[in-house]
Image: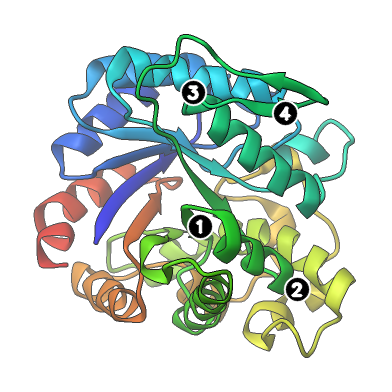
Amino acid sequence: MDFGVVLQTDPPARDVVEGLRAAEDCGFRYGWTFDSCVLWQEPFVIYSQVLSATRDLVIGPMVTNPSTRDWSVTASLFATLNDMFGNRTVCGIGRGDSARRVIGQKPATLATLGDAMHVIKELAEGREVEHHGTPVQIPWVRNGKLEMWMAAYGPRALKMVGEQADGFILQTADPDIARWTIGSVREAAAAAGRDPAAITMCVAAPAYVGTDLPHQRDQLRWFGGMVGNHVADLVARYGDSGAVPKALTDYIKDREGYDYAHHGKAGNRSTDFVPDAIVDRFCLVGPESAHIERLQELKEIGVDNFALYLMHDEKDKTRDAYGSAVIPAV
């Protein structure tokens, strides 16, 4: 299993660069950031500095979307970084949540997302593709490589991952949900004539190493609220039974709204509806041994990559504990 760290691009940017440099020193192979350039600073500017400050770290957004930038711009950003630093980027992408809603726009449709993944990958890897009805090719790309990892929860989105994406991002560490979603992706891949084993399965979730469980839960409750935004969309489409497991839908019944001004931050009062049991299932809490046990279970399910959200008050301690004990054990 590979490991990554997910940060928000809060100013000053030098702290993001240093945080990901330190993560590489601890044994993490991937460095991720949020991509909501109203709430945080523009990530692609910072990626250039991160790649310069690290040796082998693979960098990307968790996640970008089809709407913030023209697809040709997104492709050129990745291709430029890859040309400068040697194919060390990955494109995590989804329909768009905070980046869209905070400017009064809805997430993209799945059809748009599928088209965007195709165009971005083709352009970033130097091939000609039709974009806006016009044949387009980036002429300076040399041996470009860009994997597209798609974030998904619902049945239609999971099917698209299996049919098209290079990787799957599941933003929850719940083993039951991981079994269902990974199984769905693999079934779709096989039905499309693709090798299911060739798709990287990435679980992304907060982790907090320590012994004060009530404090840890309060620090990570924001994540259940963030996941709840996506689950609310699923319930609106599929209802609260049948296509989507109750393990993913039941807890949002008391959800009343969401404040994007506190998105992804400890102490977000609009996530008070998230119960302790959901925090324990969706996140990794407790001492190092508890993290190792959960990660081993996820590994047995088929998870290839764990991306650790570091948004709490003991970020360095948790990162270092993963480097010294958790990553070597897993």
Q: Place residue 145 in its image quadrant.
A: top left
Residue highlighted by disc 4:
130
- Which residue type does callout 1 highlight? Ile
Mark 3 residue element: loop
10 Å crowding of disc 3: few (<14), some (14-19), many (20+): many
Residue highlighted by disc 2:
252
Q: Earlier in the sequence, mark 2 or mark 1?
A: 1
Q: Position of residue 3 (x, y in %)?
A: 28, 52
Q: Nearer the viewer, mark 4 or mark 2?
A: 4
- Which residue type does callout 4 highlight? Glu
Residue highlighted by disc 3:
126
**Closer to the camera in the image, 71 or 181:** 71
Question: Cα distance, mark 2 to mark 1?
Answer: 21 Å
- Which residue type does callout 2 highlight? Ile
10 Å crowding of disc 1: few (<14), some (14-19), many (20+): many
Q: Nearer the viewer, mark 3 or mark 1?
A: 3
Q: Position of residue 179 (x, y in %)?
A: 47, 82
Q: Quadrant of the C terminus?
A: bottom left
Question: Cα distance, mark 1 to mark 4?
Answer: 27 Å
- Which residue type does callout 3 highlight? Gly
